[in-house]
Amino acid sequence: MSLDDKVLLTVACTGAWPTKEHTPYIPLTPQEEADEIVRCWEAGASIAHIHVRDDEFNASMDFDKFKETVDLVRSRCDIVINLTTSGGLGLDDEIRMKPFQELRPEIASYDCGTMNWAHSTVFENSPKFLEKLAVTMVECKVKPEIEIFDGGMVYNMLHYLKKGLLQERPHLQFVLGAPGGMTAEVKNLMFLLDICRENLGHNFTWGALGIGRGHLPIKYAALALGGHLRVGMEDNIFYRKGQLAKSNVEFVERSKRMVSEIDKSIATPEEARQILNLQNCPG
Ligand code: ZN
């Protein structure tokens, strides 16, 4: 099977918001999260998108928590590591960048613009921060996963590509259904994808996710349109309506079945490294 028939499967086990009150199955400590990531890797996931929590289990960019989690994962498996740069609001640029600068994951998130979050606060990614983030990621050989929450963020990305701050053949993650971003509807994914294709041709890779109830429709649409997948409790805690997922592995297993039904298969971590041309590879 050629790499064209491989689908990247990112698992986002923890995220910034769900607590044990939302679901008792969410992994929150570094040990819990690492154990869950290893189980997802054993089930076939290609990439782990990692957030951490502080000792009160709030969203955090605590470097020690990232280090503990990443060390535990790396000691047990070869899954591609993708660190968030947005684990908490209102943090200094340096705090957001330190985990990827020090730990050198293969991928880190690059949230390509600012938006209001849940009608209550600002999800800030200022022009100054985005320029600094792009330069620092190149220095650290970390591939940006460019997260797109609305149409303006696509144009921000095109601007930074034109300026040479973002590098060619970018990898995009369409994040639909965030409170304040575009809704998780297939028409929105089509719209965003069309702008990218008009401007970049096929010179980019992409995945998509829907938050909450838009999760499955966006997954099916992404597969139909040739994209990659992200699953996990960061985005959605229900396996189906009214039924909490007991483990992130359930989402991995469902993705494998969906992908095999269209005669494709989930990329191994090694294949993911080739598809995304990653540089900070282990070993
Ligand atoms: Zn995230």
Image (tube, rainbow, N blue to C red):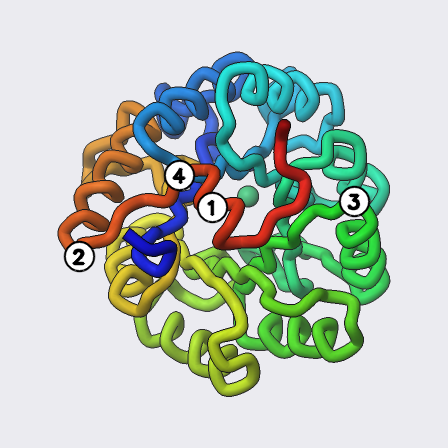
Residue visible at 17% across and 57% down? 262
Which residue does the numbered mark 3 point to in the structure image? Answer: 140
What is the number of the mark on residue 268? 4
Residue visible at 46% across and 62% down? 206
Q: CA distance from mark 4 to mark 2?
A: 17 Å
- Residue 118, picture quadrant: bottom right
Q: Position of residue 98 (x, y in %)?
A: 80, 36
Q: CA distance from mark 2 to mark 3?
A: 37 Å
Q: Is residue 150 above or below residue 232?
A: below
Q: Secondary structure at mark 1?
A: helix
Q: Secondary structure at mark 3?
A: loop
Q: Is residue 81 above or below residue 153?
A: above
Q: Is residue 54 visible?
A: yes
Residues at badges 4 and 2 in contact (C-beta under 8 Å)? no
**What's the amino acid at mark 1?**
Ala
Q: CA distance from mark 1 to mark 4?
A: 6 Å
What is the number of the mark on residue 272? 1
Q: Is residue 178 above or below residue 230?
A: below
Q: Position of residue 100 (x, y in %)?
A: 73, 38
Mark 2 vs mark 1: which is more N-terminal?
2
Observer-nearest residue: 122 or 202?
Answer: 202
Mark nearest the camera among 4 and 2 is 4
